[in-house]
Image (spheres, grey):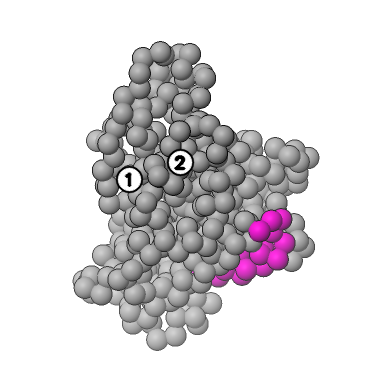
Protein backbone atom coordinates (compact mmCIF):
# COMPACT_ATOMS: atom_id res chain seq x y z
CA UNK A 1 0.00 0.00 0.00
CA UNK A 2 1.25 3.44 -0.83
CA UNK A 3 0.32 6.19 1.55
CA UNK A 4 -1.49 9.15 0.00
CA UNK A 5 1.23 11.39 1.31
CA UNK A 6 3.83 9.62 -0.79
CA UNK A 7 1.81 8.88 -3.92
CA UNK A 8 -0.26 12.09 -3.67
CA UNK A 9 -2.91 10.38 -5.84
CA UNK A 10 -6.05 12.00 -4.43
CA UNK A 11 -8.24 9.07 -5.50
CA UNK A 12 -6.55 6.90 -2.86
CA UNK A 13 -7.84 9.05 -0.02
CA UNK A 14 -10.64 7.72 2.14
CA UNK A 15 -13.83 9.83 1.76
CA UNK A 16 -13.38 11.37 5.21
CA UNK A 17 -9.78 12.33 4.40
CA UNK A 18 -10.85 13.78 1.07
CA UNK A 19 -13.56 15.99 2.56
CA UNK A 20 -11.26 17.12 5.35
CA UNK A 21 -8.67 18.08 2.74
CA UNK A 22 -10.85 19.93 0.24
CA UNK A 23 -12.87 21.84 2.83
CA UNK A 24 -9.75 23.14 4.56
CA UNK A 25 -8.51 26.71 4.52
CA UNK A 26 -5.06 25.38 3.51
CA UNK A 27 -6.47 23.68 0.40
CA UNK A 28 -8.30 26.88 -0.57
CA UNK A 29 -5.23 29.03 0.01
CA UNK A 30 -2.93 26.86 -2.13
CA UNK A 31 -5.59 26.61 -4.85
CA UNK A 32 -6.27 30.34 -5.22
CA UNK A 33 -2.56 31.17 -4.97
CA UNK A 34 -2.12 29.21 -8.19
CA UNK A 35 -4.37 31.38 -10.28
CA UNK A 36 -4.56 34.73 -8.50
CA UNK A 37 -0.88 35.47 -7.90
CA UNK A 38 0.28 38.27 -10.16
CA UNK A 39 -3.28 39.28 -11.05
CA UNK A 40 -4.20 42.32 -8.98
CA UNK A 41 -7.92 42.97 -9.30
CA UNK A 42 -8.29 39.75 -11.27
CA UNK A 43 -6.15 40.39 -14.33
CA UNK A 44 -2.50 40.63 -15.32
CA UNK A 45 -1.30 44.24 -15.33
CA UNK A 46 0.00 43.87 -18.89
CA UNK A 47 -3.36 42.73 -20.26
CA UNK A 48 -4.99 45.53 -22.19
CA UNK A 49 -8.42 45.91 -23.71
CA UNK A 50 -9.12 48.03 -26.77
CA UNK A 51 -11.36 51.00 -26.06
CA UNK A 52 -14.96 49.80 -26.36
CA UNK A 53 -17.42 51.74 -28.45
CA UNK A 54 -19.85 53.72 -26.25
CA UNK A 55 -22.78 51.35 -26.82
CA UNK A 56 -20.72 48.27 -25.98
CA UNK A 57 -19.35 49.99 -22.89
CA UNK A 58 -22.88 50.77 -21.68
CA UNK A 59 -23.96 47.16 -22.16
CA UNK A 60 -20.89 45.90 -20.32
CA UNK A 61 -21.51 48.25 -17.39
CA UNK A 62 -25.10 47.02 -17.14
CA UNK A 63 -24.02 43.37 -17.16
CA UNK A 64 -21.27 43.99 -14.58
CA UNK A 65 -23.84 45.77 -12.40
CA UNK A 66 -26.03 42.67 -12.35
CA UNK A 67 -23.02 40.51 -11.58
CA UNK A 68 -22.29 42.76 -8.60
CA UNK A 69 -25.77 42.15 -7.19
CA UNK A 70 -25.32 38.38 -7.53
CA UNK A 71 -21.92 38.54 -5.85
CA UNK A 72 -23.23 40.76 -3.05
CA UNK A 73 -26.05 38.28 -2.47
CA UNK A 74 -23.56 35.42 -2.27
CA UNK A 75 -21.20 37.42 -0.03
CA UNK A 76 -23.93 38.23 2.47
CA UNK A 77 -25.43 34.76 2.12
CA UNK A 78 -22.18 32.84 2.63
CA UNK A 79 -21.24 35.05 5.60
CA UNK A 80 -24.61 34.43 7.25
CA UNK A 81 -24.50 30.71 6.57
CA UNK A 82 -21.28 30.27 8.57
CA UNK A 83 -23.30 30.67 11.76
CA UNK A 84 -25.82 27.94 10.89
CA UNK A 85 -23.50 25.50 9.09
CA UNK A 86 -23.91 22.05 10.66
CA UNK A 87 -20.23 21.23 11.14
CA UNK A 88 -16.70 22.64 11.24
CA UNK A 89 -15.81 21.64 7.69
CA UNK A 90 -18.82 23.48 6.27
CA UNK A 91 -18.09 26.55 8.42
CA UNK A 92 -14.48 26.73 7.23
CA UNK A 93 -15.46 26.16 3.61
CA UNK A 94 -18.10 28.91 3.79
CA UNK A 95 -15.55 31.29 5.28
CA UNK A 96 -13.42 30.74 2.16
CA UNK A 97 -16.47 31.20 -0.04
CA UNK A 98 -17.24 34.51 1.69
CA UNK A 99 -13.69 35.66 0.88
CA UNK A 100 -14.12 34.54 -2.74
CA UNK A 101 -17.39 36.46 -3.04
CA UNK A 102 -15.87 39.58 -1.50
CA UNK A 103 -13.04 39.39 -4.04
CA UNK A 104 -15.50 38.94 -6.90
CA UNK A 105 -17.46 42.02 -5.87
CA UNK A 106 -14.26 44.04 -5.54
CA UNK A 107 -12.80 43.05 -8.93
CA UNK A 108 -16.10 43.67 -10.71
CA UNK A 109 -16.44 47.15 -9.20
CA UNK A 110 -12.80 47.78 -10.10
CA UNK A 111 -13.47 46.72 -13.70
CA UNK A 112 -16.35 49.21 -13.83
CA UNK A 113 -13.95 51.94 -12.66
CA UNK A 114 -11.46 50.89 -15.34
CA UNK A 115 -14.25 51.42 -17.86
CA UNK A 116 -14.56 55.01 -16.66
CA UNK A 117 -17.40 54.62 -14.18
CA UNK A 118 -16.63 57.03 -11.33
CA UNK A 119 -19.28 55.75 -8.88
CA UNK A 120 -19.83 52.09 -9.69
CA UNK A 121 -21.99 51.35 -6.66
CA UNK A 122 -24.50 53.99 -7.73
CA UNK A 123 -24.51 52.48 -11.22
CA UNK A 124 -25.17 49.03 -9.77
CA UNK A 125 -28.28 50.35 -8.02
CA UNK A 126 -29.46 52.03 -11.21
CA UNK A 127 -28.63 49.41 -13.82
CA UNK A 128 -28.78 45.93 -12.26
CA UNK A 129 -31.49 43.39 -13.01
CA UNK A 130 -34.48 43.90 -10.70
CA UNK A 131 -35.13 40.17 -10.62
CA UNK A 132 -31.69 39.69 -9.08
CA UNK A 133 -32.50 42.18 -6.32
CA UNK A 134 -35.65 40.15 -5.62
CA UNK A 135 -33.62 36.93 -5.61
CA UNK A 136 -31.12 38.47 -3.19
CA UNK A 137 -33.87 39.50 -0.76
CA UNK A 138 -35.39 36.02 -0.86
CA UNK A 139 -32.00 34.32 -0.36
CA UNK A 140 -31.21 36.47 2.67
CA UNK A 141 -34.68 35.70 4.08
CA UNK A 142 -33.83 32.00 3.91
CA UNK A 143 -30.51 32.60 5.65
CA UNK A 144 -32.16 34.74 8.34
CA UNK A 145 -34.73 32.00 8.96
CA UNK A 146 -31.80 29.58 9.50
CA UNK A 147 -33.08 27.23 6.81
CA UNK A 148 -29.75 25.57 5.94
CA UNK A 149 -30.94 23.28 3.12
CA UNK A 150 -33.08 25.91 1.39
CA UNK A 151 -30.43 28.62 1.66
CA UNK A 152 -27.66 26.35 0.34
CA UNK A 153 -29.97 25.27 -2.48
CA UNK A 154 -30.78 28.88 -3.41
CA UNK A 155 -27.23 30.14 -3.12
CA UNK A 156 -24.84 27.33 -4.05
CA UNK A 157 -27.00 25.45 -6.53
CA UNK A 158 -29.38 27.93 -8.18
CA UNK A 159 -27.38 31.17 -8.07
CA UNK A 160 -23.90 29.70 -8.44
CA UNK A 161 -24.90 27.37 -11.28
CA UNK A 162 -26.35 30.30 -13.17
CA UNK A 163 -23.27 32.44 -12.57
CA UNK A 164 -20.98 29.57 -13.59
CA UNK A 165 -22.67 29.26 -16.98
CA UNK A 166 -23.13 32.99 -17.61
CA UNK A 167 -19.56 33.93 -16.66
CA UNK A 168 -18.07 31.13 -18.80
CA UNK A 169 -20.19 32.21 -21.77
CA UNK A 170 -19.46 35.88 -21.32
CA UNK A 171 -15.72 35.25 -20.91
CA UNK A 172 -15.56 33.66 -24.37
CA UNK A 173 -16.97 36.83 -25.95
CA UNK A 174 -15.45 39.47 -23.65
CA UNK A 175 -12.55 41.89 -24.08
CA UNK A 176 -9.22 40.50 -22.76
CA UNK A 177 -9.36 42.24 -19.37
CA UNK A 178 -12.97 41.31 -18.61
CA UNK A 179 -12.21 37.77 -19.81
CA UNK A 180 -9.37 37.32 -17.30
CA UNK A 181 -11.50 38.73 -14.49
CA UNK A 182 -14.37 36.36 -15.30
CA UNK A 183 -12.13 33.32 -15.78
CA UNK A 184 -10.71 33.87 -12.31
CA UNK A 185 -14.22 34.01 -10.86
CA UNK A 186 -15.26 30.82 -12.69
CA UNK A 187 -12.34 28.96 -11.06
CA UNK A 188 -13.77 29.89 -7.67
CA UNK A 189 -17.32 29.02 -8.70
CA UNK A 190 -16.33 25.39 -9.33
CA UNK A 191 -15.79 24.96 -5.60
CA UNK A 192 -19.02 26.74 -4.72
CA UNK A 193 -21.30 24.70 -7.00
CA UNK A 194 -19.58 21.49 -5.97
CA UNK A 195 -19.99 22.24 -2.28
CA UNK A 196 -23.68 23.05 -2.77
CA UNK A 197 -24.54 19.97 -4.79
CA UNK A 198 -22.60 17.56 -2.58
CA UNK A 199 -23.82 19.04 0.69
CA UNK A 200 -27.44 18.95 -0.47
CA UNK A 201 -27.06 15.48 -1.95
CA UNK A 202 -25.87 14.18 1.43
CA UNK A 203 -28.60 16.03 3.34
CA UNK A 204 -31.36 14.78 1.04
CA UNK A 205 -30.10 11.23 1.41
CA UNK A 206 -30.36 11.53 5.19
CA UNK A 207 -33.55 13.62 5.26
CA UNK A 208 -35.58 12.91 2.12
CA UNK A 209 -38.57 14.78 3.57
CA UNK A 210 -36.69 18.03 2.85
CA UNK A 211 -37.08 17.39 -0.87
CA UNK A 212 -40.67 18.71 -1.03
CA UNK A 213 -39.68 21.94 0.71
CA UNK A 214 -36.75 22.46 -1.66
CA UNK A 215 -38.96 21.78 -4.65
CA UNK A 216 -41.15 24.65 -3.44
CA UNK A 217 -38.09 26.91 -3.10
CA UNK A 218 -37.09 25.96 -6.60
CA UNK A 219 -40.56 26.77 -7.99
CA UNK A 220 -40.31 30.20 -6.40
CA UNK A 221 -36.73 31.07 -7.31
CA UNK A 222 -36.25 29.40 -10.69
CA UNK A 223 -38.25 32.03 -12.59
CA UNK A 224 -36.19 34.83 -11.01
CA UNK A 225 -32.90 33.21 -11.89
CA UNK A 226 -33.96 32.20 -15.38
CA UNK A 227 -35.26 35.71 -16.08
CA UNK A 228 -31.98 37.31 -15.05
CA UNK A 229 -30.13 34.59 -16.98
CA UNK A 230 -32.07 35.62 -20.12
CA UNK A 231 -31.54 39.34 -19.51
CA UNK A 232 -27.81 38.96 -19.00
CA UNK A 233 -27.19 36.67 -21.95
CA UNK A 234 -29.17 39.06 -24.17
CA UNK A 235 -26.97 41.96 -23.01
CA UNK A 236 -23.83 39.89 -23.56
CA UNK A 237 -25.05 39.16 -27.09
CA UNK A 238 -25.50 35.39 -26.85
CA UNK A 239 -27.82 34.22 -29.64
CA UNK A 240 -31.25 33.18 -28.37
CA UNK A 241 -30.87 29.74 -29.97
CA UNK A 242 -27.85 28.97 -27.76
CA UNK A 243 -29.43 29.94 -24.44
CA UNK A 244 -31.40 26.72 -23.71
CA UNK A 245 -28.17 24.80 -24.24
CA UNK A 246 -26.46 27.02 -21.68
CA UNK A 247 -29.16 26.32 -19.11
CA UNK A 248 -28.45 22.61 -19.37
CA UNK A 249 -25.72 22.69 -16.72
CA UNK A 250 -28.12 24.04 -14.15
CA UNK A 251 -30.87 21.59 -15.12
CA UNK A 252 -28.38 18.69 -14.99
CA UNK A 253 -27.37 19.69 -11.45
CA UNK A 254 -30.93 19.82 -10.14
CA UNK A 255 -31.73 16.56 -11.95
CA UNK A 256 -28.80 14.83 -10.18
CA UNK A 257 -30.31 15.98 -6.91
CA UNK A 258 -33.62 14.42 -7.91
CA UNK A 259 -35.54 17.54 -8.95
CA UNK A 260 -37.07 17.16 -12.38
CA UNK B 1 -6.09 4.27 5.67
CA UNK B 2 -7.50 0.74 5.59
CA UNK B 3 -6.87 -0.36 1.99
CA UNK B 4 -6.09 0.95 -1.44
CA UNK B 5 -9.52 1.50 -3.03
CA UNK B 6 -8.04 1.14 -6.51
CA UNK B 7 -6.69 -2.30 -5.57
CA UNK B 8 -9.93 -3.46 -3.97
CA UNK B 9 -12.49 -2.26 -6.47
CA UNK B 10 -14.13 -5.67 -6.78
CA UNK B 11 -16.57 -4.79 -9.53
CA UNK B 12 -13.84 -3.56 -11.80
CA UNK B 13 -11.57 -6.53 -11.19
CA UNK B 14 -14.39 -8.96 -11.87
CA UNK B 15 -15.18 -7.30 -15.17
CA UNK B 16 -11.67 -7.51 -16.51
CA UNK B 17 -8.77 -9.53 -15.13
CA UNK B 18 -6.18 -7.91 -17.38
CA UNK B 19 -3.55 -5.92 -15.54
CA UNK B 20 -4.32 -2.24 -15.62
CA UNK B 21 -2.24 0.07 -17.70
CA UNK B 22 -0.15 2.57 -15.78
CA UNK B 23 0.22 6.18 -16.74
CA UNK B 24 2.78 8.84 -15.96
CA UNK B 25 0.92 12.08 -15.49
CA UNK B 26 2.42 15.32 -16.67
CA UNK B 27 1.47 18.78 -15.49
CA UNK B 28 -0.95 20.27 -18.03
CA UNK B 29 -1.02 23.72 -16.44
CA UNK B 30 -4.17 23.12 -14.44
CA UNK B 31 -3.85 25.54 -11.53
CA UNK B 32 -7.10 25.28 -9.55
CA UNK B 33 -5.86 22.87 -6.89
CA UNK B 34 -2.72 22.83 -4.70
CA UNK B 35 0.47 22.04 -6.66
CA UNK B 36 0.81 18.44 -5.43
CA UNK B 37 -2.57 17.54 -6.96
CA UNK B 38 -2.40 19.48 -10.23
CA UNK B 39 -1.30 16.65 -12.54
CA UNK B 40 -4.44 14.69 -11.60
CA UNK B 41 -6.69 17.17 -13.39
CA UNK B 42 -6.81 19.00 -16.69
CA UNK B 43 -9.20 21.18 -18.62
CA UNK B 44 -11.52 19.67 -21.25
CA UNK B 45 -10.46 21.19 -24.56
CA UNK B 46 -13.80 20.89 -26.34
CA UNK B 47 -15.07 18.92 -29.31
CA UNK B 48 -11.57 18.04 -30.58
CA UNK B 49 -10.53 16.60 -27.22
CA UNK B 50 -10.74 12.93 -26.20
CA UNK B 51 -10.35 10.97 -23.00
CA UNK B 52 -7.55 8.49 -22.33
CA UNK B 53 -8.14 5.20 -20.50
CA UNK B 54 -7.17 6.86 -17.22
CA UNK B 55 -9.51 9.85 -17.58
CA UNK B 56 -13.17 10.72 -16.94
CA UNK B 57 -15.04 14.02 -16.98
CA UNK B 58 -16.55 15.42 -13.79
CA UNK B 59 -20.29 15.87 -14.48
CA UNK B 60 -20.49 18.69 -11.92
CA UNK B 61 -17.76 21.05 -13.15
CA UNK B 62 -16.56 19.52 -16.48
CA UNK B 63 -12.92 19.18 -15.44
CA UNK B 64 -11.08 16.05 -16.66
CA UNK B 65 -10.10 13.78 -13.76
CA UNK B 66 -6.93 11.70 -14.25
CA UNK B 67 -5.50 8.66 -12.52
CA UNK B 68 -2.09 6.99 -12.67
CA UNK B 69 -3.92 3.80 -13.60
CA UNK B 70 -6.42 2.76 -16.22
CA UNK B 71 -9.91 3.37 -14.87
CA UNK B 72 -12.55 0.67 -14.70
CA UNK B 73 -16.18 0.47 -13.58
CA UNK B 74 -16.49 0.64 -9.81
CA UNK B 75 -13.40 2.77 -9.29
CA UNK B 76 -13.69 5.74 -6.98
CA UNK B 77 -12.30 9.05 -8.11
CA UNK B 78 -12.46 12.52 -6.64
CA UNK B 79 -12.84 15.87 -8.35
CA UNK B 80 -10.88 18.22 -6.12
CA UNK B 81 -11.70 21.40 -8.09
CA UNK B 82 -15.40 21.00 -7.21
CA UNK B 83 -14.97 18.67 -4.22
CA UNK B 84 -17.10 15.84 -5.64
CA UNK B 85 -16.80 12.16 -4.88
CA UNK B 86 -17.52 10.03 -7.94
CA UNK B 87 -17.71 6.43 -9.06
CA UNK B 88 -16.76 5.22 -12.53
CA UNK B 89 -19.54 3.44 -14.43
CA UNK B 90 -19.80 2.01 -17.92
CA UNK B 91 -22.85 3.40 -19.72
CA UNK B 92 -24.85 1.74 -22.49
CA UNK B 93 -22.68 3.17 -25.22
CA UNK B 94 -19.70 1.38 -23.66
CA UNK B 95 -18.09 4.63 -22.58
CA UNK B 96 -16.84 5.17 -19.03
CA UNK B 97 -18.52 7.98 -17.09
CA UNK B 98 -18.14 9.36 -13.59
CA UNK B 99 -21.32 9.59 -11.52
CA UNK B 100 -21.62 11.63 -8.34
CA UNK B 101 -21.86 9.75 -5.06
CA UNK B 102 -23.32 11.85 -2.25
Which numbered disc, 1 or 2, marks the residue closer to the eye? 2
Q: Which residue is mark 2?
A: A3
Q: Which residue is mark 1?
A: B39
Q: Residues within 10 Å of mark 1 (few under 14, many from 20)?
A: many
Residue B62 percent location from the top left of the image: 41, 42
In the rendered image, the quadrant that contains the N terminus of chain A is: top left
Residue A78 percent location from the top left of the image: 61, 64
Residue A76 percent location from the top left of the image: 61, 70
Which is more toward the observer, A235 or A46?
A46
Q: Mark 2, chain letter? A: A
Q: Which residue occupies the extreme front position in the image?
A: A1
Seen at 70% across and 41% down, the residue is A204
Q: Which residue occupies the extreme bottom position in the image?
A: A118
- Regarding residue A32, the answer to whether it shows in the image is yes
In the rendered image, the quadrant that contains the C terminus of chain A is: top right
Q: Is residue A82 magenta?
A: yes
Q: Mark 1, chain letter? A: B
Residue A211: quarter of image: top right
Span shown in magenta: A68-88
Q: Is residue A40 magenta?
A: no
Looking at the image, residue B18 sits to the left or right of residue A27; the answer is left
Looking at the image, residue A258 sits to the left or right of residue B13; the answer is right
Residue A23 percent location from the top left of the image: 55, 55
Seen at 23% across and 70% down, the residue is A47
Report the predominant secondary structure element of the magenta stretch: helix
Which is more toward the observer, A249 or A93?
A93
- Regarding residue A71, the answer to whether it shows in the image is no
Depicted A231 relative to depicted A121: above or below:
above
Q: CA distance from mark 1 to mark 2?
A: 18 Å
Indicate the secondary structure of the residue bearing disc 1.
helix
Q: Residues within 10 Å of mark 2 (few under 14, many from 20)?
A: few
Amino acid sequence: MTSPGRSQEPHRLEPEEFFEEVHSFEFWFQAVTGYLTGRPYGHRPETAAPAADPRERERLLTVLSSYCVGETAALEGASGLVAIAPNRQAKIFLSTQAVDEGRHLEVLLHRMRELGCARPEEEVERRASQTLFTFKRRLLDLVASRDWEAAIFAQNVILEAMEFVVFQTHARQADPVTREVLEGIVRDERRHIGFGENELGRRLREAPHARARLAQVRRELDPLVLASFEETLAEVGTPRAERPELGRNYLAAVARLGFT
Amino acid sequence: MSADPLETAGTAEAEDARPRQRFVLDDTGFDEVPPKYRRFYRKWRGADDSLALNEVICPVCSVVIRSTRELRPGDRVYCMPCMSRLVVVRVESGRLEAHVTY
